[in-house]
Amino acid sequence: MTYLPWLLAISLVFTVLERLLPWRPMQPLLRKGLVSDLGWLAINGHLFGLGTAGLMAGTSAAATAFLRGWGLAPDFRFHWMEIIVYKTLQWLPLAWLGASSQAVFAVAIASTVWGDFNHSNLKIGLGPLGRLLNSPRMHLWHHDLSTEGGTAKNFGIVLSVWDFLFGTAYWPRERSPERLGYPGMGEMPETLIGQVVWPLAKRRASAS
């Protein structure tokens, strides 16, 4: 089975759960920005990967051959930029241990489930496990617009233990942030196309 059916099924499950167990009951299902959010999902999750696949094919093949020459596992086939940016600790051990493609696929599905879980509007806690694994109510404070608890907090997606270890954990358990967002978000256009070209337009305006 391919990844897309899993993605759709997981999204449907969490959509239903949000209707049954919402942490913020006033949040509507169809809300402002949903269309642009779906657009960014398509761009970042699918179109960008397809667009860069051809460009990176030669580089990936050369890198794979080089790493095989050093005795690394033969299933070392994934986008090298993911390793550099944020997947090193996740994918390299799997490659070195010779994990099968099925195991790598299972890790991708599990990561999707937990990522959707932590970004869902669910009134679900993990009890003592909350100091090890992240949860929706804790991760919500990562998107807090205020400086309460500091401007940098709750970075973990799956594991919250890193935030507790490095002092970036902040979680008032019985309430939500008053407002979600980021500084300067009022300048961001509302349309998908506007958001895509906005950084370039802003840079040009600053340079002129």
Image (cartoon, grey):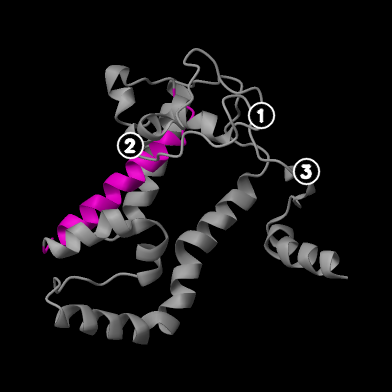
Viewer-closest of 1 and 46: 46
Q: Kindly identify which residue carries mark 3.
A: 186
Is-magenta flag for residue 25? no
Rendered-image quadrant of the N terminus: bottom left
Crowding near the residue tagged with mark 1, few <14, some 14–19, many ≥20 C-alpha atoms within 10 Å:
some
Above/below status of 42 relative to 122: below
Check disc 2 and give the amino acid type: Leu
Per the rendered image, the range of residues in magenta is 98-122
Q: Kindly identify which residue carries mark 2.
A: 159
Could you say which disc has been placed on residue 77 in the image?
none
Check disc 1 and give the amino acid type: Ser
Distance Cα–Cα, label 2 vs label 3: 31 Å
In this view, which residue lies farthest toward the top? 174
Asked if labels 3 and 2 touch by Cβ distance under 8 angstroms, the answer is no
Viewer-closest of 85 and 50: 85
Above/below status of 147 relative to 128: below
| Residue positioned 68% across, 39% down in the render | 32
Across and down, in percent, residue 80 comes to 35, 71
